[in-house]
Image (cartoon, rainbow, N blue to C red):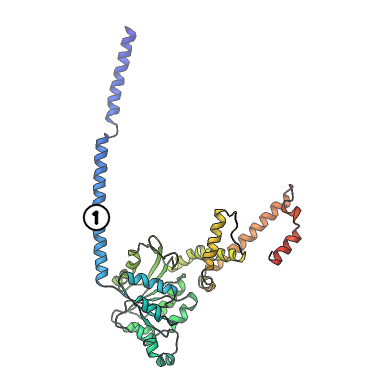
């Protein structure tokens, strides 16, 4: 019939269109599977190559371990020394306090007399193991790390006969590990002998947060002077090997970022500490987070907080911004309260005078 014929004529172009569409279809599953297998094979090859490179790098580092001297053998200095030793490096230390028991237990050669007068060092040669001069002139010393507090950094460095490091044929790599960077960079540049390099670093972790793996923990550094790249890279490899996230950043940018993160964290934590907050049976997760921040900051000395304030020029701005933010929030609350025609809320039962008295008495 005509109707039947029309259907056949209509279906014929459709068949033709289908053939074109089929020609443009995605590759068959078999082709996709082959491509996936090819990519997987390449992935395996790349992993094997990377593993081979890592082994070669580890062997190269192990063949010539570094001799690292740590000035300041307190909690943080010992924390670093343990990890250096675990990688096979040789470690010595120079301390103000008598750290011989800790050093002996770890297998670290101890030198005393940091900050002592020449007369005192001379009178206690055996106890101090020759003192600072002996520490700086020991047979081999590739790297010297100054691991003292922010507040005592300049006094410590300037008081040492750092010029003795310049007598070494290949000099030495001077490293700081402070939480501020412009200050130690200026000090080390001032005292470093011409043949000694300066590397400013900030491990963004400590004995608590870095107790286990250092994997993905940030390690910030700036190569201030680098006349011996091989030595510098060997030292940086210590942290790369531990899996740290390596962040190369100049001192100015570091201090700008730190004022917005580290100093702000300590500032808020100290404020929470002043509020004398404590756990309750109905704490929210947010409140527990605040308590954790307060406890973390309380574990650090106030000297550290003061050092972050004193030696980071950006910290003053952060402090002023926080003060302004508190005032702005208070005024917003007062403005809303002035136009609020609803109930008086807590003020109905607790007059403002009573609340002020409770605040003054610390209740």
Q: Is any part of residue 361 visible from this angle? A: yes
Please state if 213 lies on the left or on the right of 286 as rendered: left
Name above or below for residue 121 compared with residue 331: below
Residue name at image x 39 percent, y 88 percent: 127
In terms of image quadrants, where is residue 281? bottom right
Where is residue 315 drawn, in percent x and y? 53, 68
Name above or below for residue 220 compared with residue 141: above
Where is residue 92 drawn, in percent x and y? 35, 79
State the SS at label 1.
helix
* Nearest the eye: 216 or 317: 216
Where is residue 349 drawn, in percent x and y? 75, 54
In terms of image quadrants, where is residue 176? bottom left
Name above or below for residue 275 compared with residue 197: above
Residue name at image x 37 percent, y 88 percent: 130
* Nearest the eye: 170 or 88: 88
* Nearest the eye: 292 or 184: 292
Q: Of all residues shown, which one is farthest toward the top?
A: 1
In terms of image quadrants, where is residue 164? bottom left
Where is residue 219 drawn, in percent x and y? 40, 65
Residue name at image x 71 percent, y 67 percent: 361
Position of the C terminus by quadrant: bottom right
Label 1 belongs to which residue?
A: 48
């Amino acid at each position: 019939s005509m109707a039947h014929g029309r259907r056949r004529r209509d279906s014929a172009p459709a068949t033709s269109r289908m053939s074109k569409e089929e020609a443009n279809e995605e590759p068959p599953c078999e082709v996709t599977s082959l491509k996936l297998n090819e990519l997987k094979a390449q992935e395996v090859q790349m992993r094997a190559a990377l593993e081979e490179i890592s082994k070669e790098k580890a062997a190269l580092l192990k063949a010539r371990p570094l001799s690292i001297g740590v000035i300041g053998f307190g909690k943080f200095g010992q924390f670093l020394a343990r990890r250096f030793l675990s990688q096979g490096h040789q470690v010595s230390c120079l301390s103000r306090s008598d750290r011989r028991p800790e050093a002996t237990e770890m297998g670290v050669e101890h030198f005393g007399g940091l900050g002592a007068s020449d007369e005192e060092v001379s009178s206690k040669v055996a106890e101090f193991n020759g003192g600072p001069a002996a520490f700086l002139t020991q047979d081999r010393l590739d790297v010297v790390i100054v691991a003292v507090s922010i507040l005592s950094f300049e006094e410590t460095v300037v008081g040492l006969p750092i010029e003795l490091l310049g007598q070494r044929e290949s000099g030495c790599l001077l490293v700081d590990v402070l939480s501020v960077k412009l200050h130690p960079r200026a000090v080390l540049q001032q005292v470093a002998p011409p043949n000694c390099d300066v590397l400013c670093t900030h491990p963004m972790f400590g004995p608590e947060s870095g107790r286990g793996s250092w994997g993905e923990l940030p390690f910030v550094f700036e190569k201030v002077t680098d006349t011996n790249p091989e030595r510098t890279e060997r030292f940086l490899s210590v942290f790369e090997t531990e899996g740290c996230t390596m962040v190369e950043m100049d001192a100015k940018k570091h201090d700008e970022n730190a004022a917005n993160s580290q100093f702000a964290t300590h500032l808020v934590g100290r404020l929470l500490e002043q509020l004398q907050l404590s756990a309750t049976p109905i704490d929210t997760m947010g409140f527990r987070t605040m308590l954790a921040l307060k406890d973390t900051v309380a574990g650090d000395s106030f000297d550290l907080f003061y050092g972050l304030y004193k030696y980071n020029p950006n910290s003053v701005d952060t402090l002023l911004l926080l003060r302004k933010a508190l005032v702005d929030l208070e005024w917003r609350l007062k403005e809303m309260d002035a136009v609020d025609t609803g109930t008086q809320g807590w003020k109905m039962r607790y007059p403002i005078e009573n609340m002020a008295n409770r605040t003054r008495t610390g209740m």
